[in-house]
Image (spheres, rainbow, N blue to C red):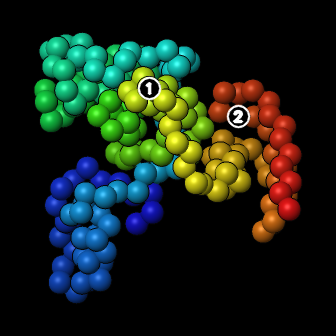
Amino acid sequence: MANKASSSSSLPDIGEEDVELKEELMLYGSESGWVEARTHCDHLDSLSSDLTHIPIPGTPCNRCEHPKENWLCLCCKEVLCSRFVNKHMLEHYQQINHGLALSYSDLSVWCFSCDAYLDAQVILPLRPVYETAYILKFGQAPPFRTIDHSQAIVEEAVNYGSKIRSINSKVDFYFLGRGKDHCNRALKIRIR
């Protein structure tokens, strides 16, 4: 079930023969409300170039002025209400195809094109907007989450078409290539 998020609220009809799959969906899928955020997305090229200067949480919807359940479009920085209010962010995606949005309620990031939540702390291009929104909402920097940083770097390199020269269990990592922003990268990590 990794990297599969669903916006559906009901279990798919998979028949009686696959009870184990149904139980797994109930435990980890849409029935429980828990989804695993994706650690990569192919739609990040549409991100705004400046996501450190964003409207503050609590900004009302630009269309209906509703003060709650608002999302920030990460492409044009417009603030619009959720599908549970007047669906203005969803309409924005359908009309303009801006598919990446950050929830001001819980600071989650959603990709409409992938139909999935994205892990803004692991996906490096999303980290600045997550940290900025967190500071604006809570008045302090977000706590550091324990993640395997070498794995996050490897995932970024693989996802952005870079070449990995070597990697082993103690992590020798050489990264030469272009990042998603088309800048050349040269990175050497050696953890022993």
Where residue 184 sits: x, y (%)?
80, 30
Which numbered circle lies on residue 17? none
Residue 71, by quadrant, is: top left
Residue 138, by quadrant, is: top left
User: In the image, 192: left or right of 79?
Assistant: right
Who is closer to the viewer here, 97 or 172?
172
> Quarter holding the C terminus?
bottom right
Q: Amino acid at mark 2?
A: Gly
Where residue 174 sits: x, y (%)?
85, 49
Q: Amino acid at mark 1?
A: Gly
The residues tagged by marks 2 and 1 sit, at their Cα atoms, a distance apart of 31 Å
Who is closer to the viewer here, 100 or 69?
69
Residue 99 visible in the snapshot: no
With respect to residue 3, does 102 lie above or below?
A: above
User: In the image, 26: left or right of 57?
Assistant: left
Q: Residue at x 65, y 33 (%)?
A: 180
Q: Residue at x 44, y 17 (%)?
A: 54
Is label 2 in a helix, a strand or a loop? loop
Q: Nearer the viewer, mark 2 or mark 1?
A: 1
Furthest residue to the bottom? 17
Which numbered circle lies on residue 139? 1
Mark 2 or mark 1, which has the lower sequence index?
Answer: 1
Furthest residue to the front? 139
Residue 139, by quadrant, is: top left
User: In the image, 134: left or right of 90?
Assistant: right
> Quarter holding the N terminus?
bottom left
Q: Which residue is mark 2?
A: 179
Q: Residue at x 19, y 20 (%)?
A: 67
